[in-house]
Amino acid sequence: MKNKFKILLFLFLLFCSEYISAQKVATDSLAIDTVTIGNTKEFEYTNKKSTKKENIHWDSHIRLRHELWDNQEDLNDTLDDLFSFFRLKVYLGAGFQINENMEIYARVVNESRYYGYKGTGDTITTDQTYRPQRNYFELVIGQLYFKWKNVAELPLTLTVGRQNLHNQGFGNQWLIGDGTPLDGSKTFYYNALRINYQFKNKSTIDAVGLVSFAEDPIVIFSEIEKTVTNITDEQGAWLWFKHKLNNKIPYSAFYIYKHENGGGGFHRTKESNIHTLGLHIKPESKNYWLDGQITAQGGNYGNVSRTGFGTMIYGGYQYKEDTWSVKAGPWFMYLTGDNPETENFEAFNNLFGGYPNDDELYLNTWAAESGTSMWTNISLYGAYVEYMPTPKFNIRFWYHLMQTNQLESGNFFGQGKSRGQMIMLKAMGEFGEKLKAYYMFQYLWTGDYYFTGADNAILSRINLEWYF
């Protein structure tokens, strides 16, 4: 591991030095998440429309998906685990502008499932949490917050309440992603207080505090007894500083704290405190770019000390014209696993992370290892090609070669370290101002890390979104 880290750090610094000397560097935005790789589970688009009263606006959205899953979590063809179903999601949102600087916003959401073929069990959850079928009706509060800009005539913005943070420039959803992972992509919210301050040199700092619940405590209406949103109750906070080095290279330095109450199964059984320090750097020249995050963790897991290390790095070549572009290159991810030969707990914790790059299929195979949407214990070597023939269409192909760092015990696991290989193809398009669509196909070839005879897995999705 030490040699891998030294090589990785050397390449990382080498890239940085090349970009510092580049003559033409993108400086149009302080945000380092402007050139995104993932973050396309939804289009993250808000179609605000004003009423006759200029202080009221509303936005609305309907999403229809068809999904086909095969062996997505159990990797076993002998089980009846084929699922073919539609997901219908509707949200209605409205904002009230109290004055030039103050706004109240609310959004209500429903998502239901309609099965064409349904296997013997819903494979997306585990017995340690709750096994919903999700073909029920419920109405939940997706967002409800108060936002105040220019507080005390300072460049300070305060946002308090139920709010989305996964698309707010906190590192491409790697550590700050879905605040409600167990309800799928129905909601993403955090119950949070966010304070943003912009300095005169256009650097910014965000301070965020939050509380999350395993079950939503304020459901408007539901046909089921409880609405499960998380593995355990959680509390957390972070400081996120953004700046540009030499006014050319955007970077973020951050500290994240998370407390897990425990009792959630897998790596969430014990009460835990996690401290994470990290750096995110994203230099870009005309034809080359790099997007790298590196983090170290400490704290405790029950009565033992915990440590962890994680990094995710993309890079490559890009060619842009006025109406089309192409991008290609390698990417790498390393997350520590728990070493059973030590007393400490070394598994990396993805904190409030989501699904970077839409890699849902291989993350879902980890449900038996770490829990739904929680992941660790991997060395991933990949490559990608992305082609945008017009500004409104995009085609992506991704390849993954995956290894594990530590073996796991149990019937689901084997004695090898190969997690297998996976490909992802995704085509996205916008049709007019209101209709957006994509098709995504993922295929996983299993390795000897899993039990003998583990079968390959498939995820296929058609996604339509209409904004009105």
Image: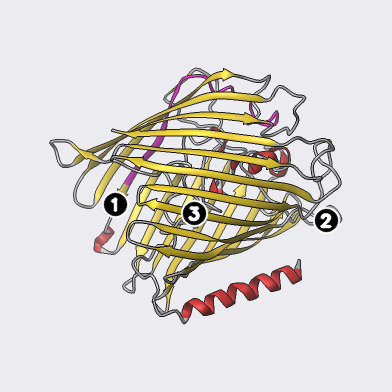
Position in image of residue 438 (x %, y %): 45, 39
The quadrant in which the C terminus is found is: top left
The answer to whether residue 117 is above or below residue 386 is above
Image marks 1 and 2: residues in contact by CB distance under 8 Å: no
The secondary structure type at the circle numbered 1 is strand
The numbered mark, 3 or 1, whose residue comes first in the sequence reads 1
Q: Name the residue that disc number 3 marks.
A: 386
| Whether residue 291 is visible | no
- Let me know if residue 331 is in the magenta part: no
Magenta range: 124-146
The numbered mark, 2 or 3, whose residue comes first in the sequence reads 2
Q: Name the residue that disc number 2 marks.
A: 343
The secondary structure type at the circle numbered 2 is loop
- Say what amino acid the circle numbered 2 marks: Glu
Q: Nearer the viewer, residue 259 or 281?
A: 281
Which-is-in-front pick, marks 3 and 1? Answer: 3
For residue 140, side relative to residue 414 (left or right): left
- Say what amino acid the circle numbered 3 marks: Glu
The answer to whether residue 76 is above or below residue 430 is above
Q: Name the residue that disc number 1 marks.
A: 148
Residue placed at 55% from the left, 44% from the top?
A: 425
**Count of residue discs:** 3
The answer to whether residue 309 is above or below residue 126 is below
Position in image of residue 46 (x %, y %): 32, 42
Q: CA distance from mark 2 to mark 3?
A: 44 Å
